[in-house]
């Protein structure tokens, strides 16, 4: 288990299902996460208090912002911390995907990454934290090998070779 921490900050409780998917993927990579709720719009003081507490924590961290409709949350977190920030907004059907633009078009000087898939957001956090953690990098590599082996096996099955042992 890594000593790193990945705070997953939701804009509201309605984002919890999406955030929980990220937490599950992080746990699978051996990373600790904490689910929190704070809004850049309706509770900016609460958000800043929360971020101050996290900033005092010496563990390496990557923040993940999960906020539907408008993702000012990732920008507010990024403006407050020097740690990496990933925006992973849930898809809002009401806007047909247009809501994601609030994550993509932030003012200059803000640099949160935008990853739409919860598992991929967890993977990016692991890769970032893995820069300084060889064991975590190896867990990422193990996952990559497993995905490759699964794909090669699926291809072999499609070609009529269900018991083929192909090494990538």
Image (cartoon, grey):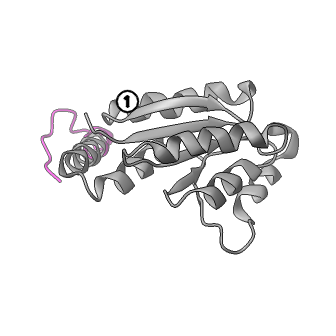
Q: Which residue is mark 1?
A: 27
Q: Residue at x 77, y 43 (%)?
A: 44
Disc 1 crowd rating (10 Å Cα; few below 14, some 14-19, many 20+) is some
Q: Answer above or below: position of 143 versus 75.
A: above
Q: Position of residue 77 (x, y in %)?
A: 64, 52
Q: Residue at x 29, y 59 (%)?
A: 131
Q: Residue 163 magenta-drawn?
A: yes
Is residue 66 visible in the rendered image? The answer is: yes
Between 86 and 165, which is closer to the camera in this rendering? 86
Task: Give the extent of the magenta segment.
Answer: 151-168
Between 31 and 150, which is closer to the camera in this rendering? 31
- 137 vs 17, left or right, is left
Q: Looking at the image, which residue sits at the far bottom?
A: 108
Q: Residue at x 34, y 31 (%)?
A: 28
State the quadrant of the C terminus.
Answer: bottom left
- 125 vs 52, left or right, is left
Q: Position of residue 158 (x, y in %)?
A: 33, 41
Q: Secondary structure at mark 1?
A: helix
């Amino acid at each position: 288990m890594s000593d790193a921490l990945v705070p997953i900050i939701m804009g509201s409780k309605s984002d919890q299902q999406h955030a929980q998917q990220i937490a599950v993927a992080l746990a699978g990579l051996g990373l600790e996460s904490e689910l929190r709720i704070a809004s850049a719009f309706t509770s900016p003081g609460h958000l800043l208090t929360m971020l101050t507490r996290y900033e005092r924590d010496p563990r390496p961290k990557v923040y993940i912002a999960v906020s539907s409709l408008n993702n000012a949350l990732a920008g507010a977190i990024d403006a407050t911390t020097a740690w990496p920030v990933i925006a992973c907004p849930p898809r809002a059907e009401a806007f047909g995907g247009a809501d994601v633009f609030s994550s993509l078009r932030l003012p200059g000087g803000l640099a949160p990454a935008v990853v739409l898939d919860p598992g991929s957001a967890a993977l990016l956090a692991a890769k970032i934290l893995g820069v300084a953690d060889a064991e975590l990098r190896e867990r990422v590599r193990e996952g990559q090998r497993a995905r490759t082996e699964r794909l090669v096996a699926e291809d072999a099955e499609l070609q009529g070779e269900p018991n083929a042992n192909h090494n990538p």
